[in-house]
Amino acid sequence: MIRIAIQAKGRLNEQSLDLLREAGVQVDENRRKFLTRSTSFPLEVLYLRDDDIPQAVSMGAADLGIVGYNEVAEKGFAVDTVQQLGFGACRISLAIPKGESYTGPSYFAGRRVATSYPRILREFFAREGVEAEIHEIAGSVEIAPAVGMAEAIFDIVSSGGTLVSNGLQEVEQVLHSEAVLIATPGLGGEKVALLEQLKFRFGAALDSRGMKYLLMNLPAESVDRAIEILPAMRSPTVMPLAQTGWCSLHSVVREQELWAKIEALKAIGAEGILVLALEKIIK
Ligand code: ATP
Ligand code: MG
């Protein structure tokens, strides 16, 4: 049995549960429960505030956790960061009022900066040799300059829209973050094996995201050119068709490149192109 802490509600809750489900770990979504047992894998899910996940994992109250790397870096508890999970991307940035000219980190010397991430900010200023005043507040950081609580902020940014609507401009991106899988240092025995199993399943589920399976019929003489267009895991699968001079070609492509690849393949004679959803990639 292994226990994983995930965010009880908020931005990472649903994607954490989706990833577990894609990895074959079914969990009962009864939100009133604080601890639930998977029906398909020897695992318990502990639902916590994201702020509490690094400490819970560091102490061993949970063996594993899914949390934003920003929380891991801010809290500073000893945990192993085991895997990047590719969702929940954001950055923590310094922002100043729009229209102010920015000259570099020394801009902040002697100024007051509001943040919920004092540790990361303190480390940044120490690295840059800047003495600024860090004013810790728990929420609504972006309004601090407008109400006179601070002259700048250090906060989470994803699209930047919140900054713009509060009359601020982003001037330093200090930390890039995404959701990560963390583990208690020195897990033993059965738990190590379960962690390895989960990592492998998460990897397969994550690798298949944004990928499509492509099948087509192709004149045999175009196969070499098709292989150049479609670099697959090893190379595309080519099978002869009953009709001589033709073959069937199968490959995996990134969704972003799908239309460009299809156009290139049509130009070398591909016909009957099928695009299928891809569920897992097991490397
Ligand atoms: P909790 O109630 O669990 O303490 P919270 O309000 O602190 O939740 P959320 O806003 O749900 O946290 O964000 C959780 C995580 O999602 C962040 O720590 C960060 O890693 C990630 N994230 C991604 N994009 C954003 C964004 N635009 N704003 C805030 N967090 C983001
Ligand atoms: Mg929180």
Image (cartoon, rainbow, N blue to C red):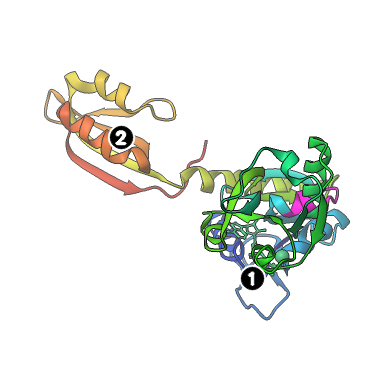
Tell me which segment is drawn in magenta: 71-79
| Horizontal side, residue 222 vs residue 276: left or right | left
Please tell me which residue lies in front, 2 or 88.
Answer: 88
* Outermost residue, bottom side: 32
Q: Which residue is mark 1?
A: 9
Is the residue marked 1 within 8 Å of ligand 1, measured from its CB?
Answer: yes
Residue 45 seen in render: no
* Outermost residue, right side: 59
- Tag 1: residue type? Lys
What's the residue at 37%, 37% (across, down)?
252
| Horizontal side, residue 78 vs residue 196: left or right | right
Callout in the foreground (1, 2): 1
Percent of width and height locating residue 276: 31, 48
For mark 2, give the secondary structure. strand
For mark 1, give the secondary structure. loop
- Tag 2: residue type? His
47 lies above or below 95: below
Taking the magenta stretch, the answer to whether it contains residue 136 is: no
Percent of width and height locating residue 155: 67, 56
What's the residue at 84%, 62% (across, down)?
61
| Horizontal side, residue 50 vs residue 58: left or right | left
Residue 170 seen in render: yes
